[in-house]
């Protein structure tokens, strides 16, 4: 479980960076839009990244084993 914990923490850390980067980019591209809208875009991007990274990289099923 320790390697999975490390992978989970790494994926979530990168997801936080994705969240911040997307929100910042949206705010810079559309400065007239409310900050909350840019933040929502970052949240969506970060959540999608976290799900995909954790589902397919960290917690992928091993061949021949069941969870």
Image (tube, grey):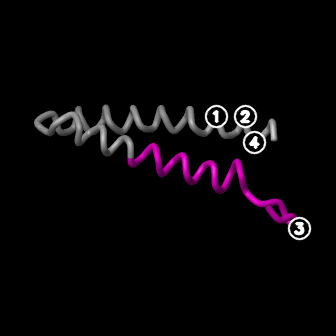
Q: Does the residue at mark 1 contact the one at mark 3 (Cβ under 8 Å)?
A: no
Which one is in front, 27 or 65? Answer: 65
- x%, y% of residue 10? 64, 34
Q: In terms of image quadrants, where is residue 40?
A: top left
Q: For the residues marked 4 and 3, what is the alpha-carbon distance in whole angstroms? A: 18 Å
* Residue indicated by mark 1: 10
* Residue indicated by mark 2: 6
Q: Does the residue at mark 1 contact the one at mark 2 (Cβ under 8 Å)?
A: yes
Residue 7 as seen in the image, left or right of residue 45? right
Segment colored magenta: 44-67
Q: Residue 64: which disc? A: 3
Dominant secondary structure (helix, strand or loop) of the stretch shown in magenta: helix
Q: Does the residue at mark 3 contact the one at mark 2 (Cβ under 8 Å)?
A: no
Where is 24 relative to 8, above or below? above
Pick whichever of labels 4 and 3 is earlier in the sequence: 4
Q: For the residues marked 1 and 2, what is the alpha-carbon distance in whole angstroms? A: 6 Å
Which one is in front, 29 or 44? Answer: 44
Label 4 secondary element: helix
Question: Is the residue marked by circle 2 packed among few (<14), some (14-19), or many (20+) residues within 10 Å?
Answer: few
**Residue that protrudes farthest toward the right in the picture:** 64
Q: Does the residue at mark 4 contact the one at mark 2 (Cβ under 8 Å)?
A: yes
């Amino acid at each position: 479980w320790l390697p999975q914990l490390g992978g989970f923490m790494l994926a979530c850390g990168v997801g936080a960076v994705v969240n911040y980067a997307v929100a910042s980019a949206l705010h810079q591209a559309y400065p007239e839009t409310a900050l909350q809208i840019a933040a929502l875009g970052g949240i969506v991007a970060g959540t999608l990244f976290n799900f995909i990274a954790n589902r397919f990289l960290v917690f992928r099923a091993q061949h021949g084993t069941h969870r």
